[in-house]
Amino acid sequence: MRKYNGIDRKSFPLFLKECEFRFNFGTPSQQLKILRDWCGI
């Protein structure tokens, strides 16, 4: 997966967490709402 997406070794764990978040929290509008709630915006 790292080679396919061109992700370097140092940022690969963060990339995986982002993929996990996007998979688990639905549509982009739902993701934005959740991030705003977490940040208190």
Image (tube, rainbow, N blue to C red):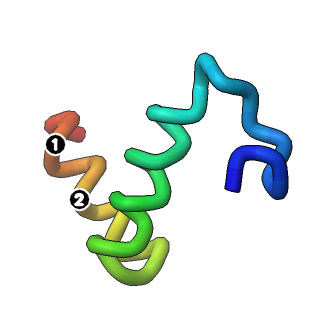
| SS at circle 2 | helix
Q: Is residue 8 left or right of residue 25?
A: right
Q: Is residue 35 left or right of residue 1?
A: left
Counting the numbered discs, the total is 2
- Residue at image location 48% in from the left, 73% down from the top: 28
Within 10 Å of disc 1 (Cα), the crowding (few <14, some 14-19, many 20+) is few
Give residue 10's quadrant in the image.
Answer: top right
Quadrant showing the C terminus:
top left
Give residue 31's quadrant in the image.
Answer: bottom left
Tag 1–tag 2 contact (CB < 8 Å): yes
Which residue sits furthest bottom?
27
The amino acid marked with disc number 2 is Ile
Within 10 Å of disc 2 (Cα), the crowding (few <14, some 14-19, many 20+) is few
- Residue at image location 16% in from the left, 42% down from the top: 38
The amino acid marked with disc number 1 is Trp
| SS at circle 1 | helix
Q: Nearer the viewer, residue 34 or 23?
A: 23
Q: At which x and y percent is residue 25? A: 29, 72
Label annotation for residue 13: none
Between the residue at mark 1 and the residue at mark 2, the CA separation in whole angstroms equals 6 Å
Residue, disc 2: 34
**Is 23 placed above or below 36 here?**
below
Q: Is residue 40 left or right of residue 2?
A: left
Q: Nearer the viewer, residue 10 or 36?
A: 10
Q: Nearer the viewer, residue 9 or 41?
A: 9
Residue, disc 1: 38
Q: At which x and y percent is residue 6? A: 84, 42
Quadrant showing the N terminus:
bottom right
**Is 14 placed above or below 24 here?**
above
Q: At which x and y percent is residue 36? A: 27, 48
Q: Is residue 24 left or right of residue 17?
A: left
- Residue at image location 47% in from the left, 48% down from the top: 16
